[in-house]
Image: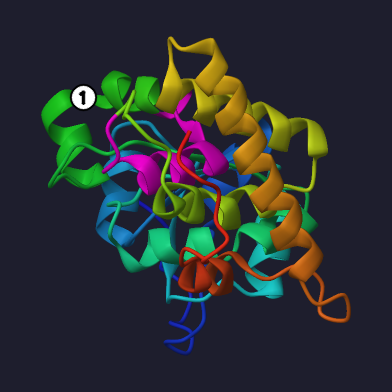
Amino acid sequence: SLPPPSPAPRPETYSVVVTNLAARDISAQGEVILVEGYMDTIALHQHGITNAVATMGTAVTPRSGSTLARYAKTVVAAFDGDSAGMAAVVRGAALFQEQEIKVRIVEMPAGKDPDDWVREAGPEAFRQAVRDAVSLIDYRLNRAVREQPDGSANITAEMVGQVVPILCDLRSEIEREEQIGKLAVRWCHPDLGRVQQAEAAIRQEVRQALRRAPRSQGRPTPASREQAATPRPQAPRPV
């Protein structure tokens, strides 16, 4: 059985409950699986997935980031897509980057949590999902464009406005260019000319957004950017 959980923190704080047993296995594997609550954690441990820990609260703090960084440099979040825990992970993207923590997201089946999934499909199915987990940036971009049809006739200001704040969070120019190219292909394939035009349009909007970011405060957080991501009058013309 698992050791008793630590005392619950203040509700606005996103905390990571790391048991002694989990800490040992997390350090050995270099990876921690974050789940929403104790029941998910217990179910995974009972099925041999012992590097899982529970989260609590709705705000990522430097303390929670440093706690995770002490044990592992890869975090795999296995939450319902609309949960408070997932929202906290997305809002904490910049903090995870500061701690040099790589974040990946398990694409959970609709209406399932890890407790249900591991009991119904078995531990190997869950382990495979962890291996297939996507990067945090891919997860955020996938959600942003999910409602937009692939190969749509035009790239609209609304479509660009949804992805620009996410692309601005990438510190690596190389990774940002890679993601811009993937988005352009997703929207405009197989028309190479339109792919190139889309790349140029997205790149221009990203550069303008980065220039607008207050220098004294650094780049905006994911939450503030995504809330402010509305089409501007001078947004790129359809391509």
Query: What residue sits 51% from the left and 76% below the top?
Result: 59
Query: Which color scheme is applied?
Result: rainbow
Q: Does any portion of residue 74 appear in the rendered image?
A: no
Say if 147 sits above or below 225 in the image: above
**Secondary structure of the magenta portion, mostly?**
helix
Instruction: Give the camera-side residue of 173 and 28.
Output: 173
Query: What residue sits 56% from the left and 32% below the top?
Result: 198
Q: How many marks?
A: 1
Q: Give the x, y percent position of residue 56.
A: 42, 72
Say if 59 sits above or below 137 in the image: below
Q: Give the x, y percent position of residue 128.
A: 37, 19
Q: Is residue 131 magenta?
A: yes
**Mark 1 neighbour class, 10 Å CA radius: few under 14, some 14 to 19, many 20 or more:** few
Q: Quadrant of residue 154?
A: top left
Query: Left or right of 130: which side holds 197?
Result: right
Q: Give the x, y percent position of residue 172.
A: 80, 40
| Dot 1: element | loop
Q: Give the amino acid type for the residue marked by disc 1 in the picture.
A: Gly
Provide the residue designation for mark 1. Answer: 122
Query: What residue sits 68% from the left and 53% below the top?
Result: 168
Q: Magenta region: which residues?
A: 130-149
> As drawn, which residue projects farthest toward the right?
216
Query: What residue sits 22% from the left and 47% below the top?
Result: 113
Q: Quadrant of residue 145?
A: top left
Q: Does any portion of residue 227 appear in the rendered image?
A: yes
Q: Give the x, y percent position of residue 126.
A: 31, 28
